[in-house]
Amino acid sequence: MQEQARNHDVVGRYGGEEFAILIPGANEETGYKIAEKLRQRVADEIEIPGSEGAPVTISAGVAAHRDGYKKEDWFAAADAALYAAKRAGRNRVMVNELTQATIKP
């Protein structure tokens, strides 16, 4: 994740198995593209020793910051998209439907 981030992006753990990338100035489309690139890279390049070739996948939720959002609102929107990705079968990127503009994952 750190390799994909720009110098002014913020990458960190958010919960036990959850991570977040805060991308200043990014809209839903940019966030989706970055998350999808990361998802694909994980699938293509990461292998866990001893896993007998079991695929490594990630699910991601994307939400853009909106005027009037508190920090908690923004994370809740991204979290809702993450759980939508998990319900839809995992190993995918979903954009929060409340903030979605031009992306149709």
Image (cartoon, rainbow, N blue to C red):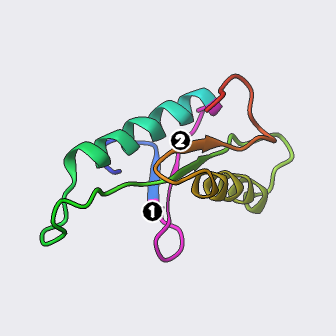
Residue 15 as seen in the image, left or right of residue 11: right
Residue found 48% across the figure and 77% down from its top? 16
Q: Which residues are magenta?
A: 12-28
Q: Position of residue 99 (x, y in %)?
A: 77, 38
Residue 80 as seen in the image, left or right of residue 82: right
Say whether residue 27 is visible. Answer: no
Q: Quadrant of the C terminus?
A: top right
Give the alpha-carbon distance from disc 2 to disc 1, as whole Å: 12 Å
Q: Label 1: which residue?
A: 12
Q: Which amino acid is tagged 2?
A: Ile
Q: Quadrant of residue 29?
A: top right
Q: Residue furthest right?
A: 68
Number of numbered markers: 2
Q: Position of residue 27 (x, y in %)?
A: 64, 30
Compared to 24, does 54 lie above or below?
below
Q: Residues within 10 Å of mark 1 (few under 14, many from 20)?
A: few
Q: Secondary structure at mark 2?
A: loop
The question of residue 23 being in magenta is answered with: yes
Q: Secondary structure at mark 1?
A: strand
The question of residue 52 being in magenta is answered with: no
Residue found 63% across the figure and 57% down from its top? 87
Q: Label 2: which residue?
A: 23
Q: Position of residue 100 (x, y in %)?
A: 74, 33
| Closest to the observer, 10 or 49 | 49
| The disc label shown at residue 83, or none | none
Whether residues under marks 2 and 1 lie with C-beta atoms below 8 angstroms apart, the answer is no
Q: Which amino acid is tagged 1?
A: Gly
Precedes in sequence: disc 2 or disc 1: 1
